[in-house]
Amino acid sequence: MTERIEVAEPTATSAPRGLWYRLGPIWSLVSLLVIVYFVTLINSFLGESVQVQLQYALVNLIIVVALQIFIGTSGVLSFGHVAFVAVGAWTVGLLTIDPELKRNLLPDLFPFLFDLNAPWLIAVLIGGVVGGLLALVVSPVLMRLNGLQAGIATFALLGVVNQVLTYWSSVGPRSGQSMVGIPDVLNLQTTMLFAMAAIVAAWLFQRTRPSRLLRAAREDGIAAASSGINVVSQRIIVFAVSGIVAGVAGGLFALTNRVVQSSQLNIELTFVTLAMLVLGGMLSLSGAVIGTLVFSLVDVLLVRLQNGLEIGAYVVTVPQGARAIILGLILVGMLLFRPSGITGGREFVWPFRKDRPLPGMPPTNES
Amino acid sequence: MIGQLVQSLVDALSAGATLGLAALAIGLVFGVIRLANFAQAEIITASAYCLIFAWGLGWYIAIPLSILVAIAMSLLMEFAVFSRMRSANPATLLIASFGLSFLLQRVYELMFSNNVRTAPVASGLAQTVEFAGIRIQLLSVATIVIAGVLLLGLNWFLTRTSQGLQLKAAAADFRTARLVGIPAGRVIALSFALSGILAAAVAFVLTVQSGAVGPTFGVQITILALVGAVIGGIDKISGSLAGGFLVGFVTSLLATWLPQEMSNFKDAYVFVLVIGVLLFKPSGLLIKGRGVART
């Protein structure tokens, strides 16, 4: 728990340094956006297959940002966010598949769903709304729980949503089948813009009252509650916001994958996205972004190595299947040797500024 | 009708017993070091692989070997990973065990391929016997017997031996247990070894049931066991057992008695139930009071 909670506004007398303190958070935002931009730019030179992989990585990035908004702010574990991703994907699937096609492929749908149609951008936004609404509806129940109990309850939510989507053919394909025919409209650049928008949204949200209050409660729940913070209601707000972001990510997943089936939106995705967040450091937005990008870049590299990568006169290969093992080792090693992640739960700050405590504040202590 | 009822009850009892054992294995370790070990799934898988590959050599080799492998894997996890993260909180430990589980699954994939391996393990148990007009699977009876014997043995161990009492004390309050001189490392290792034995029993039952083992063999039951342990009260050894049993029992009954179009959603009903239980008894059904579990 290393993040400094910014309470003291810099005074006018310390204007030059105060300016840096004001700009510090903006630098953290700008540097993240620049990193995302360059990673996208560099990798799009590496060929078609990498581009596809990268687009998935950017979609995952948005899911991880959604996870970070909730887990990082509240300190409560959630295995349930993929449920919001799933309903977002479902929404976009239902709204963008051609009505004629829908009638043939998904014959058991509620009749009103047949003619419902929306341009993909609107559909993605509606997906976000649906994800946020689901989060809002379940949150009064889930947000009362802490620790392991919260983890299990959110996991149970994922289980329920996944089963309903798998078997309820009135809102989707029959069990074992998938939704196909989602239009090919999303390219890498647009996905990158969405990822950047998610980062900006998360950054802005960090500066709002609910987020600050909840971070205070994360650091010391009893002290926060006795200062009059209603932890449950703050969590509900934050959970709903992260549900919106996850829903948007789900919509983008549908447009990227072009096929939606419930088995892809289950434990595996939950685990992979959580691993990315843990890798980067779950307490900071920078952690979410860096974790996802590092994980994805290592993955890109390993896929290339599996196919044989030429370095000068040598061809380097790793055996098939080693890729997932290496990714697993990286995660377990990170948890063993640096449990707070690559960023250690800190945001990027302006590189020239030493991280000194504000006057009048106790020095931040590592825990 | 009566026959069907008895049959479904026996099946539910055996499903509950299997899941109860799996949940108990998780609860034993959690009580001592606050780790909900999801990688228990891979201990079960390893033990099951062992049964499949060694069954040709005779059951008297395969079964002891599978138990040894389970204990060894369990201890190895403790020494290689979890003993190095003692100060982490339960949520981080859970994620670490997820990571370990994911890693081991991929290792199994590389070693044994993604396809299931099959062998007729204890095929004698797979038949059904007819008794007073009631058809009962021999395996269900065997499962209940195995669980009963293990639980009696464990109970004897925990209440009658010095090692067992130390473990029980550590599970009740680890810090105080250390203060009165209970050796921490040994008790922790003991809890891992016991959970390995329980995992081997679960692996045996599941392997006989399906006869086929793949890299993710143990995952499904471990998820349900974890859920069961938490709603029963993972803080208490008996709570984990009861919670696991309850989840297995209810799921099995729902699968038998719900009409087809509704039984698809049986896990969903169980999960809704789980959320409900957690809302009213967050620390578990068997824990007194409404307090949140110490973490």
Image (spheres, coloured by chain):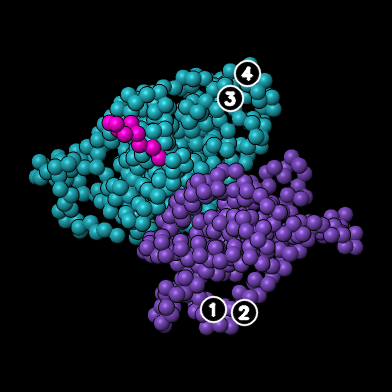
Chain colours: A cyan, B purple
Q: Is residue B286 visible?
A: no
Instruction: Report whether A5 appears left or right of A305.
Output: left
Residue range in magenta is A310-318
- B46 falls in the magenta region: no
Residue to which mark 3 is pinned? A180
Do the residues bearing badges 1 and 2 touch, measured as CB atoms within 8 Å?
yes
Find residue A129 and report its horizontal and vertical position in percent. Answer: 49, 32
- Helix, strand or loop under label 4: helix
Tags 3 and 4 both on a single chain:
yes
> Subunit of mark 1?
B
Q: Nearer the viewer, mark 3 or mark 4?
A: 3
Mark 2 or mark 1, which is nearer the start of the sequence? Answer: 2
Find residue A93 and report its horizontal and vertical position in percent. Answer: 55, 26
Quadrant holding the C terminus of chain B: bottom left
Cα distance in 3D space between marks 1 and 2:
8 Å
Instruction: Report whether B102 appears left or right of B237.
Output: left
- Helix, strand or loop under label 1: helix
Mark 4 or mark 3, which is nearer the start of the sequence? Answer: 4
Which numbered circle lies on residue B164? 1
Tags 1 and 4 both on a single chain:
no
> Subunit of mark 2?
B
Residue to which mark 2 is pinned? B156
